[in-house]
Image: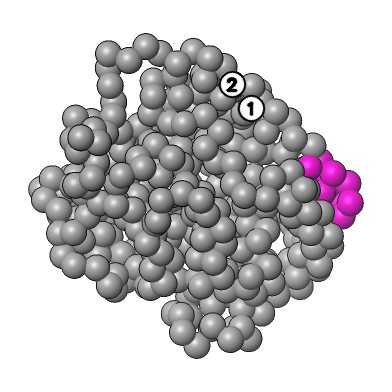
């Protein structure tokens, strides 16, 4: 019988924990260096491309570093407790492919700075896929040429977000693994189904598949390019069903999923779309099912960091972020029939857990 974890009788994996801590430290150091190199190549002002206006306080560097260390320690504890597999985020391609992607990202920085300085956000409208997605999706999020529709965007996305967050993006995603494990504990994973909504390049799905080899996994995304990248990251693992569809109308049966997860989706949706997507998530969940949402901090979560949230959508094309930053997400999900179970902060993100009544 393929029992899902957590096995509380198992000995703690201290070696795996230390390995994860060391890997995280190297990851943060590497991406911090890439971040600094990018600023040097184009200049901080050019990279931002416009003045930033804010009225709220900014975090001190020591605050950011303290919370980053907390995130990385918690991430290593996932491995110690058998909730995550050490180094599961590593995908095909290895170091040569990774360095190639870093080089391509750095080469694109000047062009991206130019697009930012001109507030150019419409190249995605010219993409062949633009006619098949909603208007709110066919735009250049983060000033990426082609937005989320282009193969180049999908290829560079992971190194871009890791560079932006100084190597912490993977650890913020993995914060979903503990609430997944708590819901799965003691149950036969072969009889469970999990859906990742807006799965992107499939990084979280790879983590989940590494931990749960027998669970039925599905990933849904609007971008065919990102799903192709997800196929690459999931290569060599047991099949994950990838679905090209709009989360506003998921082509899945009612009450078909035990767990639904979504990472960094809701801040990129208009307010009315957020509510429709929440309703669809609730529809496909089984009674008693669990929803885990990881997304950006909101105003007031860390009051001394609010200025950073104020500046973010000005530096990166995020048209729906200001509304998201003050939206009442608990009320949003309760309106869909989901009850709040837990909420916690994970560095620059928040982890929200809901249950379907």
Asked whether 122 or 76 is in front, the reply is 76
- On screen, residue 34 versus residue 176, left or right, reads right
Question: Where is residue 113 drawn, in percent x and y?
Answer: 79, 63
The quarter in which the N terminus is drawn is: top left
Name the residue at 45% across, 71% down.
Answer: 222
Query: Number of marks in the image?
Result: 2
Which mark, residue 23? 1
Mark 1 surroundings within 10 Å by alpha-carbon count, few (fewer than 14), some (14 through 19), many (20 or more): some
Relative height, residue 114 to residue 316 (above, below): below
**Do callouts 2 and 1 mark residues in contact (Cβ within 8 Å)?**
yes
Question: Where is residue 211 drawn, in percent x and y?
Answer: 39, 37
Asked whether 126 or 142 is in front, the reply is 126
For the residue labelled by badge 2, is the local secondary structure a helix, a strand or a loop? helix
For the residue labelled by badge 1, is the local secondary structure a helix, a strand or a loop? helix
Question: Where is residue 34 drawn, in percent x and y?
Answer: 78, 42
Label the magenta part by its dominant secondary structure: helix
Rendered image coloring scheme: one colour
* 36 is within the stretch colored magenta: yes
Mark 2 surroundings within 10 Å by alpha-carbon count, few (fewer than 14), some (14 through 19), many (20 or more): some
The residue range painted magenta reads 34-47
- On screen, residue 69 versus residue 184, left or right, reads right
Name the residue at 68% across, 68% down.
Answer: 152
Quadrant of the rendered image containing residue 187: top left
- On screen, residue 65 versus residue 333, left or right, reads right
Relative height, residue 182 to residue 218 (above, below): above
Question: Where is residue 313 drawn, in percent x and y?
Answer: 59, 57
The residue where tag 2 is placed is: 19
Name the residue at 44% across, 80% down.
Answer: 134
């Amino acid at each position: 019988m393929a029992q899902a974890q957590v096995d509380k009788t198992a000995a703690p994996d201290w070696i795996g924990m230390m390995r994860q801590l060391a890997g995280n430290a190297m990851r943060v150091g590497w991406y911090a260096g890439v971040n600094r190199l990018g600023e040097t190549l184009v200049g901080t002002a050019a990279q931002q491309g416009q003045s930033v206006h804010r009225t709220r306080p900014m975090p001190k560097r020591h605050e950011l570093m303290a919370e980053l260390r907390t995130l990385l320690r918690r991430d290593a504890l996932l491995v110690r407790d058998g909730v995550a597999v050490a180094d599961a985020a590593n995908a095909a391609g290895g170091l040569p492919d990774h360095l190639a992607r870093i080089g391509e990202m750095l080469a694109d920085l000047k062009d991206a700075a130019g697009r930012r300085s001109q507030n150019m956000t419409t190249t995605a409208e010219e993409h062949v896929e633009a006619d098949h997605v909603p208007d709110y999706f066919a735009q250049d999020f983060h000033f990426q040429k082609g937005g989320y529709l282009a193969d180049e965007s999908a290829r560079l996305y992971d190194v871009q977000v890791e560079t932006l967050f100084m190597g912490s993006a993977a650890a913020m995603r993995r914060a979903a693994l503990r609430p997944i494990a708590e819901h799965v504990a003691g149950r036969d994973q072969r009889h469970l189904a999990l859906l990742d909504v807006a799965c992107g390049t499939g990084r979280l799905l790879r983590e989940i598949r590494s931990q749960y080899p027998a669970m039925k996994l599905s990933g849904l995304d609007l971008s065919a390019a990102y799903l192709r990248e997800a196929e690459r990251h999931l290569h060599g693992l047991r099949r994950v069903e990838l679905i090209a569809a709009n989360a506003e109308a998921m082509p899945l049966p009612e009450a078909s999923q035990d767990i639904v997860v979504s990472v960094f989706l809701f801040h990129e949706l208009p307010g009315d779309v957020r509510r429709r997507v929440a309703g669809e998530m609730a529809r496909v969940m089984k009674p008693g099912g669990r929803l885990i949402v990881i997304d950006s901090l909101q105003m007031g979560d860390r009051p001394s960091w609010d200025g950073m949230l104020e500046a973010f959508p000005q530096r990166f094309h995020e048209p729906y972020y200001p509304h998201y930053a003050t939206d009442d997400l608990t009320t949003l999900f309760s309106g869909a029939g989901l009850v709040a179970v837990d909420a916690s902060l994970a560095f620059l993100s928040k982890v929200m857990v809901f249950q379907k009544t």
